[in-house]
Amino acid sequence: MAQPDPQTAPRMIAISSGKGGVGKSTVTANIAVAMADAGLSVGVVDADIYGPSIPRMLGVSTDKPAMSPDGKVIPAQAHGVKVISMAMLTDDDKPAILRGPMVTKYLQMFVRQVDWGQLDVMLLDLPPGTGDIQLTLAQAFPLTGAVVVSTPQDVSLKIARRGLRMMEQVNVPILGVIENMSGFTCPDCGSVTHIFHQGGGAAIADEIGVAFLGAVPLDPTVVDCGDDGRPLVRAAPSSPAAQAYRDIARALAAGKDHMAGIATPFAWTLADGAGKPAPAAPLTDGPRDRLVAIDHDDGALVLDWADGSRQRLADRDLRLACTCAKCRDEMTGKRLLDPANVPLDLSLLRVWSVGNYALGMTFSDGHESGIYPFGALREMAGTELEDV
Ligand SMILES: Nc1ncnc2c1ncn2[C@@H]1O[C@H](COP(=O)(O)OP(=O)(O)OP(=O)(O)O)[C@@H](O)[C@H]1O
């Protein structure tokens, strides 16, 4: 598999929320147009498979998309933004009833089988919650990071905190928190009055140690704009909410987090070295569970971590540590794999990235269903040398 070029791979940003109706899709549509207005090439994947609303908000047709001569789906386009959505593949009044694996298939298709051209930024409007689709995305794609949208009410903020923790667990960097419907914009004089609590989004961002990207005021015009397919940044560019969207878009487009750690995705065949990721520049901050280099030497995988430590994990130990459903009972955690059945001379054949948070491996006994999260690898007893 070809490695993405950090210079040309788009920033892939997931827009998420702990609960529905907090304005995540409205934020996505507006910051996409604000980024396009700033000269960036922007694609939006409406990953809200069960309730797609991006086409309506951007005013794009939900007709079945055309195909390019090389068999790719041609995205719709509006306000300088390319869009693909489930709404283009289903009838308006038929809900998408899909099981997890089908959702994964569609999302893969939306990202990889669409004729996006050269994008600077790809925004993924996630469905609300911390379920299957969010995990699927984190596993399947090398997300640059995720943004969490919340309203100022305590319940919404509490749920947002859960979303932030989930992203942390799967090693998706959190680019920041957006507080939406924060204060009310008077339709007559344009002044903003804080009718709910204020500052909860900033407090959560502070608590988790991530950026607070901005507060978007409640503005009745936003609703009409969403219904008319003309985002607020176009319909009322001088309103406080439009200004807030533009500031958020600028902060997200300029982030310095891109491709921190080794570039993903990669698939490395050890025998001939094909696809081996190049070492990344050392990181001065960020999570310690981030790989900056990977090698294989004398029957062991050698992992260099962001905090400067190096770990050597023997091929056979890695095979024995597999926690897939064939090797470990999912309910009791009891090991099902009998070490006597694992050859002493077993070796590692292939290593690949799983999202931004784990490695997949093929061993010489043909086993390849295990996923090794970075956190779990770090906890494995190997030879760990601090500060090499
Ligand atoms: N800043 C705002 N001021 C006023 N209305 C807003 C604002 N942001 C969003 N809305 C309105 O709130 C409603 C919900 O917004 P939206 O569909 O973007 O939420 P969502 O979080 O994507 O919801 P879901 O994911 O559950 O579909 C819409 O009617 C939208 O126009």
Image (spheres, rainbow, N blue to C red):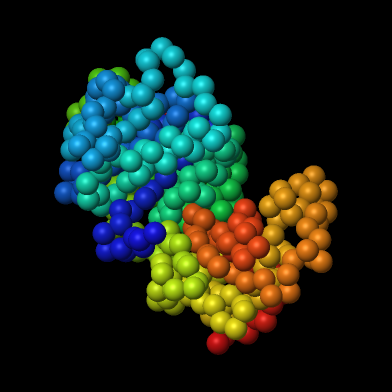
Above or below residue 325? Residue 21 is above
Quadrant housing the N terminus: bottom left
**Does residue 177 appear anywhere in the picture?**
no
The residue drawn where x is 78% and y is 63% is: 341
Percent position (x, y) of residue 155? Answer: 59, 34
Percent position (x, y) of residue 203? Answer: 52, 50
Could you say which quadrant of the image residue 383 lies in? Answer: bottom right
The residue drawn where x is 26% and y is 27% is: 65
Above or below residue 181? Residue 199 is below
Whether residue 371 sits left or right of residue 344 in the image: it is left
**Does residue 136 appear anywhere in the picture?**
yes
Whether residue 11 sits left or right of residue 344 in the image: it is left
Name of the residue lying farthest toward the top: 93
Q: Nearest the camera: 112 or 139?
A: 112
Quadrant housing the C terminus: bottom right
The residue drawn where x is 57% and y is 85% is: 387
Could you say which quadrant of the image residue 87 lies in? Answer: top left
Above or below residue 196? Residue 324 is below
Q: Nearest the camera: 344 or 251?
A: 344
Q: Nearest the camera: 2 or 38?
A: 2
Whether residue 333 sits left or right of residue 256 in the image: it is right
The image shows a total of numbered marks equal to: 0
Percent position (x, y) of residue 177? Answer: 45, 47
Could you say which quadrant of the image residue 78 lies in? Answer: top left
Percent position (x, y) of residue 137? Answer: 48, 45
The residue drawn where x is 37% and y is 50% is: 12
